[in-house]
Amino acid sequence: MILFEPGFSGTEFPLEHPRIGAHAISGTVAASTEAAGFSAIFAANLNTTQWWRPTAVPATWDLTFTSAPVSYFGIAAHDLFTVGATLEVQRWDGAAWVTIITHTPADNSVIFGLLIRTTRDRLRFRFTGGIPTIGVISMGDVIEFPQRCQYTGSTSFEMADQDEYRDTLSEGGQVLDRFRTRRSIPARMEVSHLSEAWSDSVLTLLRTYAKDWPIFMADRPASRPKSVVFGLTKAPIQPERTIPQHRVAMSVTIEVMGNVSA
């Protein structure tokens, strides 16, 4: 689910343009509590096989970092819906924590928040209700694409899951059971008519980052708030020249193998 800070309408480009959350900020993690084996720092390592879990609610998790522009946060591999937890995103105003977003999830899918770009050095996440288990919490300066993604031939990310099954049938053709043997969410986004200058300054850095680290990706934030995925790119990001005009020559296809909701 994509969340918006009240008053946010896009930093440089409209909210129908794709966004990618990458270049995650690192810093010092602090949490109100942590269960044995579920350290708070695990939520900062972008790994969906290690989790932070507090021992009581309200629970808080915050990151203190070197002052930098922040315009997105992301949460993945969580069970907020399952346990009935509510999320509050809070900024530090110099004297107290101020809540800027409150959200009670309707499922355990990826949460991608778009914020008014502000130079910050702290951000906090507060949880009430049930005690959550969370694999990834990250933040940074979001990448906004200057063009919309291709619409024809695309699939909204929340419907891109591809399951493989093993079925058990009787000799008479009766259905006995079904087992899911593999589940994946391949989310594919194509954007064209990008300038060489923009591609050089933005996609070159993203290409390097995405070789090693997962990203958050949303193709149409305003009209498809559930079309968001977190995961590793399936292949290196490779912009291509598709028309003979350097000002709008570049096209790029990004495919992410998404994290499967808990």
Image: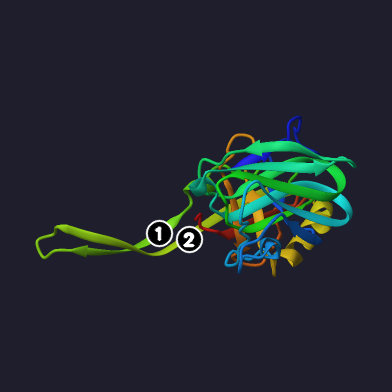
* Residue drawn at (71%, 48%) of the image: 125
Q: Position of residue 46 (x, y in %)?
A: 67, 63
The residue singled out by tag 1 in the image is 163
Q: Position of residue 185 (x, y in %)?
A: 50, 57
Q: Mark 1 or mark 2: name the one nearer the start of the chain.
A: 1
Quarter of the figure with residue 94: top right
Where is 135 relative to 13, above or below?
Answer: below
Secondary structure under tag 1 reads strand
Q: Residue type at mark 2?
A: Ser
Q: How is the image coloured?
A: rainbow
Disc 1 to disc 2, how far (Cα)? 6 Å
User: Is there a contact, CB below 8 Å, between mark 1 and mark 2?
Assistant: yes
The residue singled out by tag 2 in the image is 184
Where is 164 relative to 93, above or below?
Answer: below
Q: Residue furthest front?
A: 56
Report the side of 30 relative to 233 (left or right): right
The reply to whether residue 142 is visible in this rendering is no
Q: Residue type at mark 1?
A: Asp
Report the side of 77 relative to 248 (left or right): left
Label 2 CA crowd tier, 10 Å (few <14, some 14–19, many 20+):
some
Q: Position of residue 41 (x, y in %)?
A: 71, 64
